[in-house]
C-alpha cells in the first residue's frame, strides 16, 4: 500500500484513520504484553495450588520468559533489517498466541520453560514493532501526541486477565485458564487487524539509518538505571498475586489485585508524560521510581486491604510510566536512531528482569517468604532513581511528548 493511499487530505478522515491505527495497536499490546507476557502472574498461584509448583521453579519460568524477551530485544538491536520481513513479525505474533495456549496442554517444567522462552522473544519483537509502526502511522497523520495511549494496552491486558482468569479457573482449573486466555488473545488479534488494518499495524518496519546527533555514551546512565528498574519491578510483576494469595484474610482479593494493577497502569502512560511536561522529565522519572520503591517496601509487611491496594496501584501506576518516559528520553538523546535506543534500553531492562525472578524465587523458598526478595527489589528500584538523579543529560525544560 502506497503512503499516498493511506493518508487522506481530509482532517476528519485522517483523525479516524489515526484512531483506528491506535486502537489496533492497543489491542496488539493487550495480546503481546498484557496476555502473552503478564498472564503468568495471575495463573501462577493456580499452578502452585494444583501442581505444588515451588517459588524457585516459578522464578525460573519467569526468568526464561525474560531471557527470551532479552533475546528478542537484542535481535531488534543488532539485526533490525529482519523486522522488514513479514515472516518474522507474523511468526512472532503466532508464537505469542501458540505459546500461551500450549502452556495449558502440558505439566512438564521443561516444556513450560521452552514455551515461556519463545513467548518472551515474541513479546519483545511485537512490542518494538507495534510501537514503531503505530508511532510512524500516527506521525504521518499528525497525531504523534496520541502515542502514549498505545502503552495503555498493556494495562488493559493485565486488567482483563485479572478479571477473566478467576472465572476460567472456576470452570476449567489452571490449564483452562491458559487455554482460555489464548483463545481470547486470538479473538483480540482478529479484532485488532480488522480495526487497525493489517498492513498498517504489522507491516514490516522501515529501518532508517542513524544520524550522528547522539550515541551510546549519551544514554549509558539511563541504561543502567533501567536495568535496576527491570531487576526490581519484576519481583512484584511476577509474584504479587502469589504473595497476596498466602496473606491471611486476603486470598479472595489476590486475583483482583492484578485488576487494580492493570487499571492503574492504563492512564499512567498519559499521566506521567503530562507530569514530565509540567515539572520536567527528570523530576517525573525520579518521582515514579520513588513511588514504585515505596510500594514495594510497603508490600513487605502489607496485611490489610488498604495496604495491598496501595501496593497494586503504586506498582501499576508507575511501571509503564517509567517504560514510556525512559524510552522517550532515549529516543530524544539518539535522534534518528530511536529504534536502536529502544532496543538497547529494552535489552538492559531484559537482563534485569531475567535475573530478578530467578533470584527472588530461590530466596523465597530458602527464607520461606518474600520479605528479603521484596527488600532487595525495593533497593534496586531506589538505585534506579538515584542514577536518574545523577544523570545530567536530561533537558531542564519541557519534556518531549511521547
Image (spheres, rainbow, N blue to C red):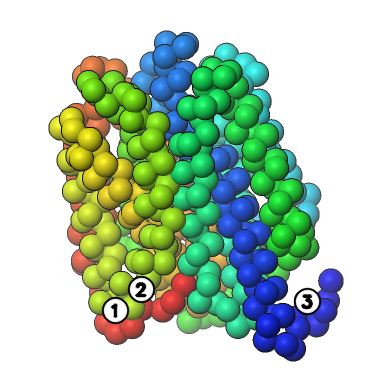
Residue 100 in the image: state x and y as whole percent. 62, 32
Residue 85 coordinates in the image, percent (x, y): 77, 56
Q: Is residue 207 visible?
A: no
Q: Secondary structure at mark 1?
A: helix
Q: CA distance from mark 3 to mark 1?
A: 35 Å
Residue position marked by numbered label 3 in the rendering? 6
Up/down of 151 relative to 273, above or below: above
Asked which quadrant contains residue 22, the reply is bottom right
- Distance from label 3 to label 2 (Cα)? 30 Å
The earlier-in-sequence mark between 3 and 2 is 3
Q: Which mark is residue 274?
A: 2
Q: Is residue 225 visible?
A: yes
Left or right of 190? Residue 65 is left
Residue marked by disc 1:
278
Instruction: Give how far across and how far down residue 179 sits, in percent.
Output: 63, 27
Pinpoint residue 101: horizontal percent, then vertical percent.
65, 29
> Crowdedness of circle 3 by 10 Å Cα count: few (<14), some, many (20+)?
some
Q: Are marks 1 and 2 in contact (CB under 8 Å)?
A: yes
Amino acid at each position: 500500500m502506497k503512503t499516498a493511499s493511506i493518508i487522506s487530505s481530509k482532517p476528519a478522515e485522517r483523525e479516524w484513520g489515526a484512531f483506528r491505527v491506535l486502537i489496533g495497536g492497543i489491542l496488539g499490546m493487550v495480546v503481546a504484553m498484557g496476555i502473552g507476557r503478564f498472564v503468568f502472574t495471575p495463573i501462577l498461584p493456580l499452578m502452585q495450588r494444583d501442581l505444588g509448583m515451588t517459588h524457585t521453579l516459578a522464578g525460573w519460568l519467569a526468568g526464561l520468559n525474560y531471557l527470551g524477551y532479552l533475546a528478542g530485544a537484542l535481535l531488534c538491536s543488532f539485526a533490525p533489517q529482519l523486522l522488514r520481513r513479514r515472516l518474522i513479525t507474523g511468526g512472532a505474533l503466532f508464537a505469542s498466541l501458540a505459546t500461551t495456549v500450549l502452556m495449558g496442554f502440558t505439566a512438564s517444567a521443561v516444556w513450560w520453560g521452552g514455551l515461556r522462552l519463545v513467548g518472551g522473544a515474541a513479546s519483545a519483537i511485537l512490542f518494538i514493532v507495534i510501537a514503531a509502526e503505530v508511532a510512524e502511522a500516527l506521525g504521518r497523520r499528525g497525531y504523534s501526541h496520541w502515542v502514549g495511549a498505545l502503552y495503555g494496552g498493556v494495562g488493559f491486558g493485565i486488567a482483563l486477565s485479572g478479571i477473566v482468569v478467576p472465572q476460567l479457573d472456576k470452570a476449567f482449573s489452571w490449564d483452562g485458564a491458559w487455554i482460555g486466555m489464548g483463545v481470547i488473545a486470538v479473538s483480540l488479534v482478529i479484532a485488532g487487524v480488522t480495526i487497525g488494518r493489517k498492513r498498517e499495524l504489522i507491516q514490516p518496519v522501515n529501518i532508517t539509518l542513524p544520524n550522528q546527533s547522539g550515541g551510546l555514551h549519551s544514554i549509558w546512565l539511563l541504561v543502567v538505571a533501567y536495568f535496576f528498574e527491570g531487576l526490581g519491578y519484576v519481583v512484584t510483576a511476577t509474584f504479587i498475586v502469589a504473595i497476596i494469595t498466602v496473606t491471611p484474610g486476603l486470598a479472595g482479593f489476590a486475583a483482583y489485585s492484578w485488576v487494580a494493577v492493570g487499571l492503574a497502569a492504563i492512564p499512567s502512560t498519559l499521566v506521567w508524560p503530562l507530569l514530565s511536561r509540567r515539572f520536567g522529565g527528570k523530576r517525573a522519572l525520579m518521582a515514579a521510581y520513588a513511588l514504585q520503591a515505596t510500594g514495594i517496601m510497603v508490600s513487605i509487611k502489607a496485611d490489610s486491604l488498604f495496604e495491598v491496594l496501595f501496593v497494586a496501584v503504586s506498582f501499576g501506576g508507575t511501571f509503564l510510566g517509567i517504560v514510556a518516559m525512559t524510552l522517550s528520553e532515549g529516543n530524544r538523546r539518539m535522534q534518528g536512531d530511536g529504534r536502536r535506543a529502544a532496543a538497547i534500553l529494552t535489552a538492559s531492562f531484559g537482563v534485569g528482569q531475567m535475573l530478578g525472578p530467578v533470584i527472588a524465587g530461590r530466596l523465597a523458598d530458602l527464607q520461606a517468604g518474600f520479605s528479603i526478595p521484596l527488600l532487595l527489589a525495593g533497593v534496586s528500584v531506589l538505585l534506579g532513581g538515584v542514577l536518574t538523579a545523577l544523570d545530567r543529560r536530561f533537558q531542564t525544560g519541557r519534556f518531549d511528548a511521547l
